[in-house]
Image (tube, helix red, strand yellow):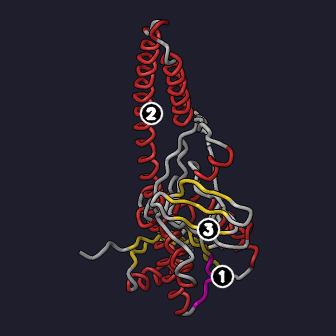
Amino acid sequence: MSPPLSRVLYIDDDAALCRLIVRSLARKGFDVTSACSGPDGVALVERERFDVIAVDHYMPGRDGIATLEDLMAIEDCPPVVYVTGTDEGKIAVAALKSGAVDYIVKSADEDFLDLLASTFAQVVAQEDLRRARDRAEADLRATNQRLEALLREVNHRVANNLQMVMSFVGMQANAIAGDLDAGGAREVLRKTQARIATIAQINRRLYSTGELLQEMPLGSVHESAYGAKYYHLHRADLHAALAATVRELDPAAIVLDSAARHFSETRDSVTVQFASGATASGDLLIGADGIKSAVRSQIVGATQAEFTGYVSWRAIVPSSRLPPARILLRL
């Protein structure tokens, strides 16, 4: 089945030109209806559906600009192309400011009819894209609303569960008699209850306040600020690329999968012993072995990690699965 013809309304007081345009554009695949005055054209738009409208500038009574303003007052008015026999810039500016999407200078040759056809085809295609974009954004908004409702329900259930766990921990702490608390079990349970309360508070903030924790402007903003593009790399990929480059320069310069256990020093060198039993010596030791650093612990002593009250999740999403439109959902 062939697609339906694009419906065009041509508003012009020149009846002979209207007939010529109807016949010519019909051969080019358009279904054209004409109106000989602005009010007649507006009445047609209120009753029927059109894909694009053309309005002539010079008409008795209500001229093109007045007719264009009447059309713009109609809800969901089709795109309007403004047509006139003069190339005065102020007329074009007035038409575009009043809502026209394009402007054509009328002439008496065949080129004018070809220009009309190509302009109408372009305007219809752009309108189809706009409507498709609006539908996609509406679908995304509807999806976001469903996700918000789901998250509110999840938040409610998580909050209830955390409250029950806090209550059970508190009951257990209260049940420990003084003579049975030699190992400090009651204090441990109290601290556990406090940590759970902190998690519950964060859970409420994340899903109820709409607070934006952090935003990183990327793209052109990042490039203009730092003079370079921003790229995302998986840590394992970056590590493999760096390791391969180092080994190309010196195969013995790096040893992987070796956990440091402790080190010893002399006046001239430092030696590290690894979990495998192997050792390595050098002039300088840099301890960059993470939050559970054996090097740091040996220098400053073991430190107890403390919960800051923040929990974060990271995920990797393939770019092919990202939505076509960018809509920021704040929870």
- Please tell me which residue is depicted at 40% across the width and 85% down the height of the picture: 28
Residue type highlighted by circle 1? Gly
Q: What element carries label 3?
A: strand
Which residue is identified by label 3? Answer: 281
In the displayed structure, does residue 268 sit left or right of residue 12?
Answer: right
Disc number for residue 152 = 2
Q: Is residue 95 visible in the rendered structure shown here?
A: no
Residue type highlighted by circle 3? Ser
- Disc on the earlier residue, 1 or 2: 1
In the displayed structure, does residue 236 sit left or right of residue 226?
Answer: left
User: Percent position (x, y) of residue 254?
Assistant: 54, 73
Residue 9 within the magenta-colored segment of the rendering: no
Disc number for residue 85 = 1
Displayed quadrant of residue 320: bottom left
User: Percent position (x, y) of residue 248?
Assistant: 53, 84
**Residue farthest toward the left in the current orientation of the protein:** 1
- Relative to 31, residue 327 above or below: above
- Please tell me which residue is depicted at 47% across the width and 57% down the height of the picture: 275
- Depth check, mark 2 against mark 3: the one in front is 3
Residue type highlighted by circle 2? Arg
Q: Is residue 134 visible in the rendered structure shown here?
A: yes
- Disc on the earlier residue, 2 or 3: 2
Q: How crowded is mark 3: few (under 14 residues within 10 Å), some or many (20 or more)?
A: some
Q: Nearer the viewer, residue 261 or 196?
A: 261
Contact between marks 1 and 3 (CB within 8 A): the answer is no
Q: Give the range drawn in magenta.
A: 103-108
